[in-house]
Image (tube, helix red, strand yellow):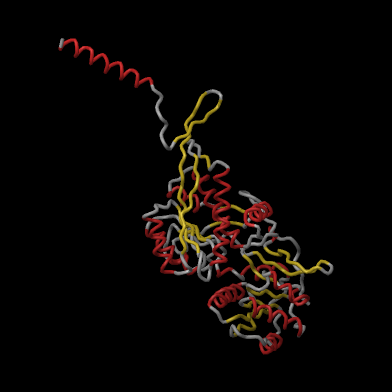
């Protein structure tokens, strides 16, 4: 009896094993089925975590918010399109992890450490502003995370020996150098240049680099003088400009002083051929100067009307339309910078055909392309690794078409929408 029971139990167990073997197996969590008519293939899905902070509060909240809008628009478009498909069948999608940095440098270091260690972010995007980005860059390098920096123009961050931090913006040292190139291209006979600028950290750094660049190009810098940020009467400076025989003026600072300077140059009919000022001219409110705005040039990281022909990603008009549909506002260059950072990450993954961080870094080192945002190429020298050397400032000029006053892109040539109005008088 006992022997019969043992044989029966063995038969039941054997039958159970045979039935289990016939059951279909559940797919692994990282795979989805798909295929063609000839059969099915497995496609792995991989979600990369992009970590960043945003100034949801604090003094940078407006510009930072637009930067994040641009990045989020790119991410949504990629995910909605089914992700990035690699040759091994992997489909890459993205997930954002973000915190409010409160426009605070100490908060940035705390939060980027959390992103790198607790959230295990695969890639990092910088916060807005050079100061906050400098704080984040230390953490990115410490934990070996590739970080694209946008909304940060300072050169200094990329001269600390970092190897994984890559800049999207034209550096501050080249904010006005393009204006010198534009002047040289437009009228090689001009030799006397005046630099009149606001005594602020940003303006001084930009103008000092432009002055050295102009001198190296053979220009005679006949005036180099700063003014207090509160200056409203530029008469004494205008007298010095005229006494020095300057043919071109470069400088300025911010909106109020730049607007007052331009207006008074016009009112006094100063006989200069070329004027380029920081910050003020790209602002729409500069048009309130009326005829005093005509001919004034200003640098911008990006403008919607720039006519670049991208070899990757959407055109400027396509980006502008998508952004307006998503957020019901015109994109600023901060918006464009956030979106462009996503495009650069996408291109690096496609070029590397991998999500391996070292392969992505190598692709960034080798990158040389044109986006709607302009040209992108990174310095790979030990002295300035990751510094942006491809992207050039866009220079707009206020021009009149009949009675209509509007901005035109006049430099660089491959993004120009009109010829430069020259001479100014």
Q: Nearer the viewer, residue 137 or 37?
A: 37
Residue 125 position, x and y percent, is 49, 57
Residue 138 position, x and y percent, is 40, 63
| In the image, residue 6 above or below residue 166 | above
Q: Quadrant of the C terminus?
A: bottom right
Which residue is found at the position 15% from the left and 9% from the top?
1
Residue 140 position, x and y percent, is 41, 59
Which residue is found at the position 41% from the left and 62% from the top?
111
> Going by the picture, which residue comes out furthest to the left?
2
- The answer to whether 21 appears left or right of 281 in the picture is left
| In the image, residue 124 above or below residue 83 | below
> Going by the picture, which residue comes out furthest to the front?
1
Quadrant in the picture for residue 171: bottom right
Residue 161 position, x and y percent, is 41, 63
Number of numbered markers:
0
| In the image, residue 129 above or below residue 316 | below
Q: Nearer the viewer, residue 188 or 78?
A: 78
> Going by the picture, which residue comes out furthest to the right?
402
- The answer to whether 112 appears left or right of 301 in the picture is left
Which residue is found at the position 41% from the left and 57% from the top?
115
| In the image, residue 343 above or below residue 2 | below
- The answer to whether 319 appears left or right of 156 in the picture is right
Q: Nearer the viewer, residue 285 or 315?
A: 285
């Amino acid at each position: 009896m006992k022997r019969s029971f043992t044989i029966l139990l063995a038969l039941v167990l054997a039958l159970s094993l045979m039935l289990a073997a016939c059951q279909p197996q559940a797919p692994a969590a990282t795979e989805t089925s798909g295929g063609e008519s000839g059969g099915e293939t497995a496609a792995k899905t991989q979600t990369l975590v992009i970590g960043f902070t945003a100034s949801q509060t604090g003094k940078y909240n407006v510009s930072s918010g637009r930067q994040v809008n641009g990045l989020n628009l790119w991410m949504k478009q990629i995910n909605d399109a089914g992700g990035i498909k690699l040759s091994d069948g992997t489909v890459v999608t993205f997930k954002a992890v973000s915190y409010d940095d409160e426009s605070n440098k100490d908060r940035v270091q705390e939060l980027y450490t959390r992103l790198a260690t607790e959230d295990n972010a695969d890639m990092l995007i910088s916060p807005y502003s050079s100061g906050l980005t400098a704080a984040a860059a230390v953490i990115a390098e410490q934990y070996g995370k590739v970080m694209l920096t946008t909304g940060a123009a300072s050169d200094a961050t990329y001269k600390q020996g970092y190897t994984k931090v890559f800049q999207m913006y034209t550096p501050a040292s080249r904010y006005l150098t393009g204006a010198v190139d534009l002047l040289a291209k437009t009228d090689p006979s001009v030799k006397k240049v005046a630099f009149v600028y606001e005594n602020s950290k940003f303006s001084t750094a930009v103008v000092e680099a432009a002055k050295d660049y102009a001198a190296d190009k053979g220009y005679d810098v006949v005036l180099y003088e700063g003014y207090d940020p509160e200056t409203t009467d530029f008469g004494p400076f205008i007298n010095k400009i005229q006494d020095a025989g300057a043919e071109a003026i470069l400088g300025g600072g911010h909106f109020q002083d730049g607007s007052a300077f331009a207006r008074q140059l016009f009112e006094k009919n100063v006989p200069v051929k070329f004027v380029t000022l920081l910050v003020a001219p790209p602002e729409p409110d500069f048009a309130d100067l009326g005829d005093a705005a005509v001919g004034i040039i200003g640098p911008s990281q990006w403008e919607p009307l720039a006519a670049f022909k991208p070899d990757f990603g959407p055109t400027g008009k396509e980006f502008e339309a998508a952004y307006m549909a998503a957020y019901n506002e015109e994109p600023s260059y901060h918006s464009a910078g956030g979106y462009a950072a996503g495009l650069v990450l996408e291109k690096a993954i496609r070029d590397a055909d991998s999500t391996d961080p070292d392969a992505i870094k190598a692709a960034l080192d080798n990158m040389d392309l044109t986006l709607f945002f302009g040209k992108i190429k990174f310095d790979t020298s030990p002295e300035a690794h990751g510094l942006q050397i491809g992207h050039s400032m866009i220079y707009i000029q206020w021009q009149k078409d009949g009675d209509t006053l509007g901005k035109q892109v006049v430099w660089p040539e491959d993004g120009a929408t009109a010829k430069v109005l020259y001479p100014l008088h």
